[in-house]
Amino acid sequence: MRTIYTVVLTLCILIPVRAQEKSATRVYENRLTPIKNAAPLLNDHPDYIEPIKTGPRFEAPILINDKEADLDVRAWRFSYNARGIVEVPNRLQAKATAIIVVHPWGVDDGQGWQSPEPAGAAFHCTPFKNKLTLKHMQDVVNPFLKAGRGSVGLVGYSLPYTRDPIRKKLYRSVGHQPSAAERKQGAKELADKLGSFAYKGQALPEKIVVSADKPVVDYFKQFPGLDATAKFNNAGFWELPIPVAKPIEVAERDLAFYDGDGYPALRDYLKKQGIRHVLLAGYSTDMCVCSTTAGYKNLRQDFNVFLVGDATLATFPGHDTPRFATSAAVAFASIDLFITQLSWVHFR
């Protein structure tokens, strides 16, 4: 089902480099110098992500040092073998860098796509959680995009499905740059399409028939923790065009990528544009940000990927805050991925 994104947990995947893609090599001196009295990591937005305070911490030599570098990105990763966190400075060429936001879905944001009542689920699955996520976009992600847009080679968003006639008019995509008239028409069509849908599904079951020997099995079969099917969301809900969320101010030259086109299309386009580095943000850290088309499990095969830890939110079932779930998801990703944060990204 296209609305469900499977989380595949893998550790330490080694991707062989094809001979034709090999470039000049150098010997990297992996010197780890202890850092004393280090400040907590991811401490800039504690309302959204719990700071990481573990030790020990080490400083390593610069890893990426591009010619004509104009973007400083300090990053860290966790190593069980090093017994701690390793921090690495990097100097990147901004024009060889893309900022990609994974799945900034526009639900409950005033554009018309809504969480179905009384029990439907979409995006972060409840109106309260979606409201908090939209605030994160406004407070954290949109300012980050505004700060970097004039410097980086590309700002992009990954969206579900393939390009439909409405979103084709709204957003620039590979092979199409909409005119101002198209954007205006697309906005009208989006409002009409989303506004005409009945956001009404079934209510929760009042009675559940269970067996004598396996009542728990029967209970969860009939009343799961997440059912985003037509039963609760209404038929046709997932066929609606999902827009970029309203708090993100999409610029004319920003680009929309679609999951349905597959990773090779995304990879090949980025390489054609001279992109070698990716600053990755988005939703949800534990699912879409790692495992969808523009997720880091794909991108890290071909690009230098830095997950911007405080510009992402994990799913947070059972909590009224994403702080702990996001911190845990970012920490898990750091085993095989560099993590940065907004205050560590400096455009010169």
Image (cartoon, rainbow, N blue to C red):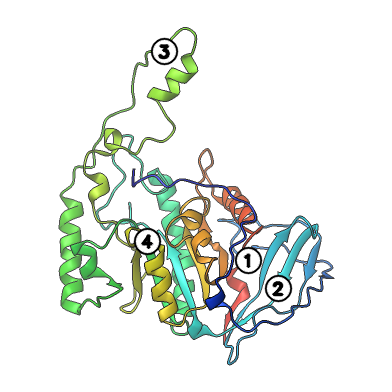
Identify the residue shown where x is 44% and y is 84%.
150
User: Which numbered mark, 1 or 4, is in the foreground of this view?
Assistant: 4
Identify the residue shown where x is 38% and y is 23%.
222
Quadrant housing residue 294: bottom left
Q: Are marks 1 and 2 in contact (CB under 8 Å)?
A: yes
Quadrant housing residue 103: bottom left
Q: Which residue is mark 4?
A: 262
Instruction: Tell me if mark 1 has few (under 14), some (14-19) or many (20+) residues whose alpha carbon lies within 10 angstroms of its own.
Output: many
Secondary element at image label 1: strand
Instruction: Tell me if mark 2 has few (under 14), some (14-19) or many (20+) residues whose alpha carbon lies within 10 angstroms of its own.
Output: many
Instruction: Tell me if mark 3 has few (under 14), some (14-19) or many (20+) residues whose alpha carbon lies within 10 angstroms of its own.
Output: some
Which circle's residue, 1 or 4, is located before the other in the chain? Answer: 4
* Mark pair 1, 4: CA separation: 24 Å
Which circle's residue, 2 or 4, is located before the other in the chain? Answer: 2
Indicate the amino acid at tag 3: Val
Secondary element at image label 4: loop
Secondary element at image label 2: strand
